[in-house]
Amino acid sequence: MNPLLSRRNFLKATSLAAASLPFAPTFSFAAESKRKIGYALCGLGSLSTHQLAPALQNTKYCRLAGIITGTPAKARSWQAKYKLPERSIYSYDTMAKLAENPDIDVVYVVTPNGLHAEHTIAAAKAGKHVLCEKPMEVSPEKCQQMIDACKAAGKQLAIGYRLHFEPNNLECIRLAREKVFGDLRFIEAGFGFAIGDPKQWRLNKALSGGGPMMDVGIYALQALRYLSGEEPISVSALATTVDTVKFRDIEETLIWQMKFPSGLLGSGNTTYRFGGINRFNVNAERGWFGMTPAYSYHGLRGSRSDGETIQMPDIDQFAAEMDDFAQCILENRPTRVPGEEGLRDMKIIAAIYESARTGKAVKLA
Amino acid sequence: MNPLLSRRNFLKATSLAAASLPFAPTFSFAAESKRKIGYALCGLGSLSTHQLAPALQNTKYCRLAGIITGTPAKARSWQAKYKLPERSIYSYDTMAKLAENPDIDVVYVVTPNGLHAEHTIAAAKAGKHVLCEKPMEVSPEKCQQMIDACKAAGKQLAIGYRLHFEPNNLECIRLAREKVFGDLRFIEAGFGFAIGDPKQWRLNKALSGGGPMMDVGIYALQALRYLSGEEPISVSALATTVDTVKFRDIEETLIWQMKFPSGLLGSGNTTYRFGGINRFNVNAERGWFGMTPAYSYHGLRGSRSDGETIQMPDIDQFAAEMDDFAQCILENRPTRVPGEEGLRDMKIIAAIYESARTGKAVKLA
């Protein structure tokens, strides 16, 4: 094949993403590699079923190469649906055998939060790179163990912060970094919903590590961090629970506020009690911009004080996230969403919970 | 005059307000009174010049009956413009002589915050009712002195909370009280602007008592209180100042959060640094509603999660406020915005400042 043509095809195929992503790689030899990165999905719940498996079909550099599940019936139905060979089916107990399977490069950990360290460490020990869903785990200590395990194995660890690859959020980051409306002064961000089934693992603290803050509040926290481009120096928080039966040992609704080194202030909120908040609003010296919805899989859009609309291409965010990690592996370059990023969020969330408990602002290093 | 016709005219004239105000009085004999309540404006700054004097022309039960000013040139120009008799012109030093002027029923105190107690007490001692601009004063102690002085004089004291008479805000209060979207769970409210002239009294703590929290943040605090219908039980706050020359001893930007007895959480913000925030958003169990702009003199409007728009008649808020107080006096009934309401805000603001200073949540009685 004419290498020029090949290169031209690559540029054409990726122009949409490249035009939208300020951090997108320049021309890459990954495109010329014939090999696709093999992903094994670890945990076959709703996200794997309805988002990740379909998204893998939309990737350029990835393919579904295996599954890891504790439910034999799921293993059979996935195997049939995706025509997976018998050797690519694992249970949590057989993850060590991943080491023998060269088709699998990455384990995508999609199990409940409190099992992320166990499954990440097992994957790393089997010599696999790991992409782990957010939140990274339930405590900073667990996050550190994951980082250490991947480092010891010489494998990359990325956290599933899909919005780092989402064109509308990236456009807002550009507006912030380029100071299109001047220095940022205040950001309000919130994400919540009315949770259903009272028996789900998200309401079980041992598995979830907490309530909506761990699950969806982390998107608002991420927005505060990636929009500001700063790390908070102090946080304070208030939490309430009205339905103490359903929310036995986790918060139902939580609001927090944070101070950044530049003097920027941030305010966040999250809930499992009601819908209707899926937004961020950024106020700068000479104007404002914001998005609502800001964190959904599709349909994101925003507005600006100068009357312009923010509406960048609506991409498959999970495909973009998995393709980026595949390229990082193929090109041996670091991910923009490493374990250290997940650890930072977990430390801040721990401080938020501490403040909600003690009634005192908590300083951050 | 045919009393029936008179009554009909009254109802017609007030139907707009009556339809919009859940707390509006039923038919009132005030309408049949020939006498208009005489207002003296105490402090002839921008608000008196551009809002209150014109608004008095739009009232049904009030008339401009005097002025109190420390600037002789202003006295002359106002006297000429409004054809005021010589006996209705006062300086701050001659307020005791108000007692001899039966034309003046109410003194509307529009001086800098830190002079409100002095002028309110002087008016009360001269036997006048007092309508005092917000914030009531600069400390709870001063507010209490004002309440005591008016009580001792047997006169009413009202605070200039004009939005208690504003149809769009009242519609939102109705949505909250009637639980149109269910129980309230979270309210976010903010009001700020980029302040100009660095020499104005609002930047002088001795006169202002504080920064934007005292001036415009109080609107967001009021919204949190009148929308919730509850009193906060704890508050926490963060404040920052970037420009320490202009904002020498007051906050530049401040955010706070509060917990209410029902479990409702509230988040507020205010600034003298940037514009673009003039809003509240209310999240309830089954939907949301909000307004932006929420606190302006005109053009208020809002939206609801069911797709309906909130856009009630655009009234002269100051005229409505002054007419209501006039009716309270004519009918000898209490105002809905008494000094106690101003004192409550001042106690909460003091707690907000304490929390911003100490980094600890402050409990409220």
Image (cartoon, coloured by chain):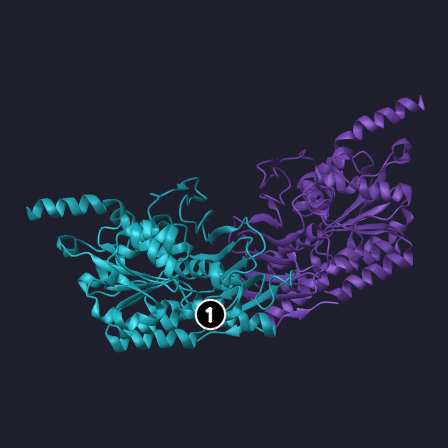
Chain colours: A purple, B cyan
Q: Nearer the viewer, residue A223 or B262?
A: A223
Residue furthest to the left: B2
Q: Is residue B163 left or right of residue B25?
A: right
Q: Nearer the viewer, residue B17 or B45?
A: B45
Q: Residue at x 38, y 53 (%)?
A: B49
Which amino acid, by three-letter code, is at mark 1?
Ile
Q: Is residue B65 visible?
A: yes
- The vertical placement of A103 against A275, above or below, is above
Answer with the quarter of the image where residue A47 lies: top right
On the rendered image, what quadrant is the C terminus of chain B found in?
bottom left
Residue A344: where, in percent of width, then height? Answer: 75, 60
Label 1 crowd (10 A; few <14 / some 14-19 / many >=20): many
Query: Which residue carries the number 1 mark?
Result: B348
Q: Is residue A132 left or right of residue A205?
A: right
Q: Is residue B79 left or right of residue B342?
A: left
Residue B280: where, in percent of width, then height? Answer: 47, 52
Residue A28: where, in percent of width, then height? Answer: 88, 35
Q: Nearer the viewer, residue A121 or A276?
A: A276
- The vertical placement of B159 against A303, above or below, is below
- Label 1 marks a residue whose chain is B
